[in-house]
Amino acid sequence: MNAQVGDAPAPERRVKAALIDLDGTMVDTVDDFTASLNGMLAELGVRPVTRDETAGYVGKGSEHLVRSVLSARFSAEETNARFTQALDRYQAHYAQVNGRHTRLYPDVEPGLAALASAGMKLACVTNKPHRFAVALLEQYGLARYFSVILGGDSVARKKPDPLPMLAACDAMGVAPGEAVAIGDSENDALAGHAAGMATLTVPYGYNHGKAIQTINSDGIVATLLEAAGFIANRW
């Protein structure tokens, strides 16, 4: 019997996995960062940070965050001298408040559910230390969607280096060309493109104080739910 036109198999989806950022993409965490930094700064006896100042530093990992805050308050020499102890105190404060002053962005869980229902493999790739990332995802019931969770200390280099993206793809058993990186900052797009994958950007989050339109990505999506539709219709 001849096959009917309607019986033809659907074309195989090119994008099989999504690598999703955490801070500024799934969860608004800047108030946690601000509280932790201010606990550290109070111990140093210097002026606190504001939410806006903190947001301008977010996205490149805890070391960059702490060093940026110290550099705005101390000389380069004193920043270097204080850095190790300040980072330790910051992380101690962060462990106390992780998740306390946060909120999910709109349509995060529906977006993850839609991506998973479409058969996509999901990884969370963040510059946040791994233990804090896992705890935060578990707090919001999101960890179950991810087969891979990589933090800023999971591999030797952080985003915008492509290594975390490549490691996540390897762990999921997909080629970089079969994946899309979704995030709120230039770091996510740079890491994704350097790894050889498509990239999508959400218009909220932090992006180091720069307009989202300055990011070279393959599209801007309002939410993760919209990202799921974009991927299904385009790739």
Image (cartoon, helix red, strand yellow):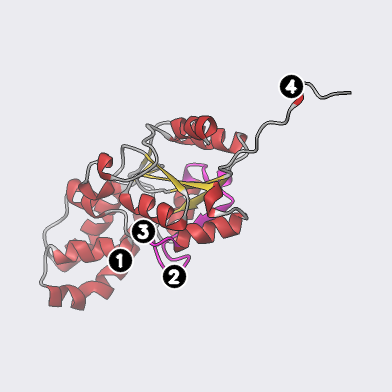
Q: CA distance from mark 1 to mark 2?
A: 14 Å
Q: Who's the residue at 39% across and 48% down the image? A: 99
Q: Amino acid at mark 3?
A: Pro
Q: Residues within 10 Å of mark 2 (few under 14, many from 20)?
A: few
Residue that carries the numbered disc 3 in the rendered image: 160
Tags 4 and 1 in contact by the CB under 8 Å rule? no
Q: Who's the residue at 32% across and 48% down the image? A: 185
Q: CA distance from mark 2 to mark 3?
A: 12 Å
Q: Which mark is residue 5?
A: 4
Task: Please name which of the two marks, 2 or 3, marks the residue nearer to the observer.
Answer: 3
Q: Is residue 153 left or right of residue 45?
A: right
Q: Which mark is residue 63?
A: 1
Q: Which residues are magenta?
A: 139-162
Q: Residues within 10 Å of mark 3 (few under 14, many from 20)?
A: many
In the picture shown, does residue 197 fall above or below 201?
below
Residue that carries the numbered disc 2 in the rendered image: 156
Q: Amino acid at mark 4?
A: Val
